[in-house]
Image: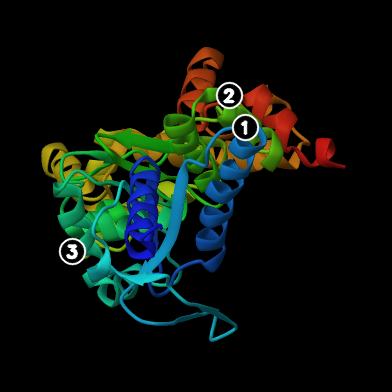
Amino acid sequence: MVNTATYGGYLRHAFDLYLVIMIQIFILTVRNAAVASIADCQHVFTMVNTFLTDRGKKPLFDVRLAGITEEVKYNGGLFKVTPDMRLEDIQAADLIIIPALTGDMSTAVMLNTPYSLWAAEQYKEGVEIACLSSGVFLLAFSGLLKGRQCTTHWSYANELKYYYPSIDVADERMITDQHGLYSSGGGNAYWNLLLHLVEKYAGREIAIYAAKYFVIDLDKSIQSPFIVFHGLKDHHDENIKEVQLYIEKHYKNKLTVDELAKHFNMSRRSFERRFKKATRNTVAEYIQRVKIEGAKKQLEIGRKSIQEVMLNVGYTDTQTFRDVFRRNTGMTPVEYKNKYSRKMLD
C-alpha cells in the first residue's frame, strides 16, 4: 500500500526540482508604472514557454508579479493589478524586471523607494535586474549604476544625467547590458530588451521566432533617429540658460566657443566649465546637436535638398555635415530624409 503522505512529499519534491531548473522572473508592480510594460513582460515570457512546449521542450520561465501591497491601481484606477506574491516572500530569483514609469520621475522614485532598495540587495545576491525605459530611475537611485552605462527614454535622458551625473547615460542606445544590469530606451524599445533576454536564456533560434511572432526588429541597436534634442535647462545657472537660448535662436549662424564666451562676458575656460556642468554637454557638442535637430526638422518637411539644408544650418563642408549628422542620428542625411520626409510619408 502506498503511503499517500510520502507520495505527496515525493511529488512536491519533484515539483521543487522542476522549478529549480526554470528561470525565476519577478515583474515588480511598482506604483506609477506604465501598465502595458507589466503586461507585455508577462506575455512575452509566457509565449516563449508556449513556443518551447510546441517544440517538445519544457517551459523555461516561471513568471510572477511581485509587490509590497495586495493590489495596485493604475491609470486613475482604470486598471488594477494583483501581485502573485510579496517581496518579502521571494526566496530565490534569477531576474527582476522593473517596468517603465510614468509622470514625474522624482515622485515615482519617492513612491517606489522600497522596491529600489530591495532590488539593490537582490543584485548583491547575484540576481540580474532589467529596467524598462524610465524604470531605470529606480536602479539609478539605488546606486548600482554608479560608474556604469545605461539608457532610457530620450525624453528623460537629460533628467537622468542631471540627477545622477556619475552614470554614463548612453541615450542613443536601444538597450544596454552591463554585468547583469539591463536597460532599454524609449517607448517600445523595451521589446528589444525582452527579446535580448529571451535570446540570452532560451537561445537565438527561439529569440528569432519570438521576434517574428511579435513583429519586432530583433537586432535594432540604436534609438538615435527617434531622439528629439532638448537641451537640459533644469539647472540654476541663469547665464548659461541665456547662452543655450542664444544658440537655439542663432544656430544657423557660424558659432564658436570664443565668440560665445566673449559675447556673454566670460573667459573661455570658465565658460566651458560652467556650460558642461550645467548642460552635461560641451559647448561644441551642444551647438552640433542644436544644428542637427534643425537639419532633421527641415529634412522632415522634404522641400529642400540636402545641400540647402546643410547650408541653412551653418555647415559648408558636405563630409563634415554628413559625419556629424550620422554621429547624432545613426543615419546619413539621405537615409533620414528618405525615411521621415513628409513627401515620402504621403
The answer to which of marks 3 and 2 sits earlier in the sequence is: 3
In this view, the mark in front (3 or 1): 1
Secondary structure, mark 1, is: loop
Residue under label 3:
117
The amino acid beneath tag 3 is Leu
For the residue pair 275 and 195, the one nearer the viewer reads as 195
Which residue is the site of mark 2? 205
**Disc 3 to disc 2, C-alpha distance:** 36 Å
- Which residue is located at x 18 percent, y 63 percent? 117
The residue nearer to you, when weighing 208 against 63, is 63
- 224 is higher (above) or lower (below) than 105: above
Q: Quadrant of the C terminus?
A: top right
Residue assigned mark 1 = 56
Total of numbered circles in the picture?
Answer: 3
Can residue 100 be spotted in the picture?
A: no
Q: CA distance from mark 3 to mark 1?
A: 40 Å
Q: Looking at the rendering, in which quadrant would you find the N terminus?
A: bottom left
Q: Nearer the viewer, mark 1 or mark 2?
A: 1
Q: Label 1 amino acid?
A: Gly
Residue 263 in the image: state x and y as whole percent: 27, 46
Residue 157 image point, x, y percent? 37, 51
Q: What is the secondary structure assignment of the residue under circle 2?
A: helix
In front here: 109 or 60? 60
Q: Residues within 10 Å of mark 1 (few under 14, many from 20)?
A: few
